[in-house]
Amino acid sequence: MSLILCRQEPVKHPYYIDVLGIHIHSSQELCYVIYNHPMLVMDDFVDELLIGFIRRELDMDYLAGRMEKLMETGSRTEDVLILFMSECDYYSEKEIQKFKATVSALRSLHPAQYDKERADYMFGQRQFGKAAGRYEKVLEYPRDRHVDDGFLAKVYNNLGASYAMMFQFHRALQAYDKAYALGKSPDVLKRIYFLTIFAPELDVKERYQALFTQELAARWRQEADTASLDAGQAEEVRALRALFKKDPVKRMSGAAEMVRRWKQEYRMMV
């Protein structure tokens, strides 16, 4: 993620945002995160650590106090953060109004839809473990005109994708099975087929075997082969190949750093 930085502030202890994997060094950077990640900041974002960072590291004691008072009166998180953005003058009034409209539209969603949006956001940030937990909670909502078969099918589909990305293929299959039962989506059927390739040990129901026609299987295998070829040309893979063209010292140093980064990314998934 890139940040637009106008000025550096004397921050000795940056504020770390684990979902994004970045350290915040200035009020402008914090404003940028708030504005561009509304789903991240609308709940459980403003806490004592953030207020302390604003008070001590950004040297905004008066503003931190005003934010605390808003929180004490039960104001929504976005209202507290809008106060912060307004005082920092990083975004124009027109842009702040646009942010208000965005969060207002999100707040107007049905609770289940809102929580699905939060889970989708975590999935988009590769926080697959957190996303799966939130999808599971969405499934606890009682059925109504919003929480219908179509909606639940999407939630189960995304839950399956979350588990698949964490290599929990049995759980992924269970979620995809429920998604297909609710929606009969061809895309879900294709994902179930892909699971049988990635994890041949899976016990796939006989009814799916009948649906995996030779024509569909051939088409899907071609997609899988194309995806594998594309992955072989991915930036990280090209970078790894380039490492082995360097001298041994630089090669070992670069490889170690790449492995460290991959490990960190995997830990963030769960």
Image (cartoon, rainbow, N blue to C red):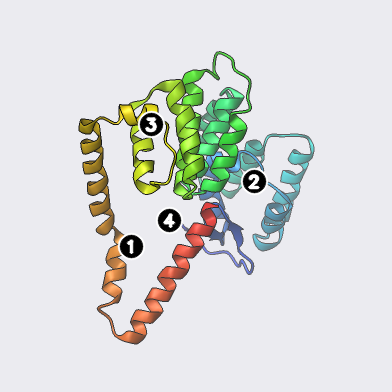
Nearer the observer: mark 1 or 4; the answer is 1
- Mark in front: 3 vs 1: 3
State the SS at label 2.
loop
- Between 221 and 64, the one lying in front of the other is 221
- Residue 1's mark? none
Mark before the other along the chain sequence, 3 or 1: 3
Residue, disc 1: 236
- Say what amino acid the circle numbered 4 marks: Ser
The residue beneath circle 4 is 2
Residue type of the residue flagged with mark 1: Glu
Q: Quadrant of residue 223?
A: top left
What SS does tag 1 mark?
helix
Give me the C-alpha separation between circle 3 and circle 1.
Answer: 28 Å
Q: Nearer the viewer, mark 3 or mark 4?
A: 3
Residue identifier under label 2: 45
Earlier along the polypeptide chain: callout 1 or callout 4? 4
Q: Residue at x 27, y 72 (%)?
A: 242
Measure the C-alpha gap from mark 4 to mark 2. Answer: 20 Å
First reached walking from the N terminus: tag 2 or tag 3: 2
As helix, strand or loop, the secondary structure at mark 3 comes to helix
Measure the C-alpha gap from mark 3 to mark 4.
34 Å
Q: Position of residue 192 (x, y in %)?
A: 38, 36
Q: CA distance from mark 1 to mark 4?
A: 18 Å
Q: Which residue lies under the disc numbered 3? A: 188
Q: Vertically, is 75 above or below 105?
A: below
Task: Decide which of 39, 230 is in the foreground and name it.
Answer: 230
